[in-house]
Image: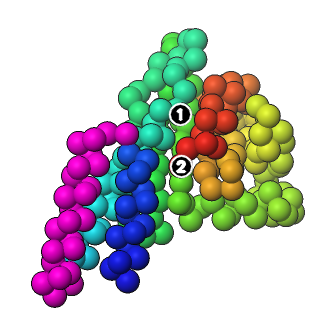
Amino acid sequence: MVRILIGAVLAFIVCLPMKAQADEVLEAIEQAVNFYKQGDFSGAAGNLDYAAQLVRQQKGGQLENFLPEALSGWTATDAQSSSMGAMFMGGGVSAERSYRKDGGDGRAKVAIFTDSPMLQTVMMMFSNPMVAASSGAKLETLAGQRTVVDYAPGENRGEIRVVVDNRILVTVEGQHVEKADLVAYLEAIDFQGLAKME
C-alpha cells in the first residue's frame, strides 16, 4: 500500500514547476521510505500525507492562474487556493477569486475545483436535464461550454456551472449582477488551457 502511495505522489511530482517545492516533496517521500524500512508505519504514512498535501497546494497554485482578471469597471481580490485530503469533505483542490463592481453593490466570484465530490452532482444535471430542472436550473451553451445556469432575474443573483474535461468544475456566481456580468467572467476563462492541465 505504501509503495502504491509513493508511486502516486511521484507521478504528480513530474508536473511540479517549482524546484524548491519538488525538493521538499521528495524529501518528505525519502523520509517516509526511511520510516517504512524502520517499521515506523505511522511516520511513513504521515510523511506521505505531508508530501501529498504539498502536491495539492502546488496544484491549487496552478488553478489560480486560470482565474480571470477583473473586467473593466470591476475590482478583483487576490486569488486564493486551498486543498484538503480525502478525510475532509471528500478532498479536492480549489482556487477562487472575488470581484466587486466599482461604485455599486455588485459582487461576483469565480471558483475552480478539481477532485471535488460536487463534480458528480453537476455531471448528473448534464446527463439528466430533469435533475437540473427540478432544482430550478437550466442547461445552456455559454462561452462555448455546456453550462448549468441557475439565475434569478428578479433578485439579480445566480450561478453558472461548467464541467471541464469531466474532471474540473468551474463556477461563476454573483449577487446584485446581471446575467451578462456572469457570462462575461465565464468568457474570460481559458477553458482550453484548463482542460490541458494535468
The scheme the figure's colours follow is rainbow
C-alpha span from label 2 to label 1: 13 Å
The residue positioned 21% from the left and 73% from the top of the image is 33
Residue 25 is a magenta residue = yes
Task: Write down the residue under mark 2.
Answer: 198
- Determine whether 134 is above or below 65 in the image: below
Position of residue 76 measured from the top left corner of the image (x, y, whole percent): 46, 23
> Residue 175: which quarter of the image?
top right
Q: Which residues are magenta?
A: 17-42
Res 43 seen here: no
Residue 166 is a magenta residue = no
Label of residue 66 in the image: 1
The residue positioned 21% from the left and 52% from the top of the image is 24
Mark 2, secondary structure of its residue:
loop
- In the rendered image, the residue lying farthest to the left is 38
Position of residue 130 measured from the top left corner of the image (x, y, whole percent): 87, 63
- The type of residue carrying mark 1 is Phe
Q: Is residue 39 left or right of residue 196?
A: left
- Determine whether 118 is above or below 39 in the image: above
**Main secondary structure type of the part rendered in magenta:** helix
Front in this rendered view, residue 159 or 86: 86
Q: Residues within 10 Å of mark 2 (few under 14, many from 20)?
A: few
Position of residue 128 measured from the top left corner of the image (x, y, whole percent): 85, 63
The residue positioned 63% from the left and 31% from the top of the image is 190
- In the rendered image, the residue lying farthest to the bottom is 39
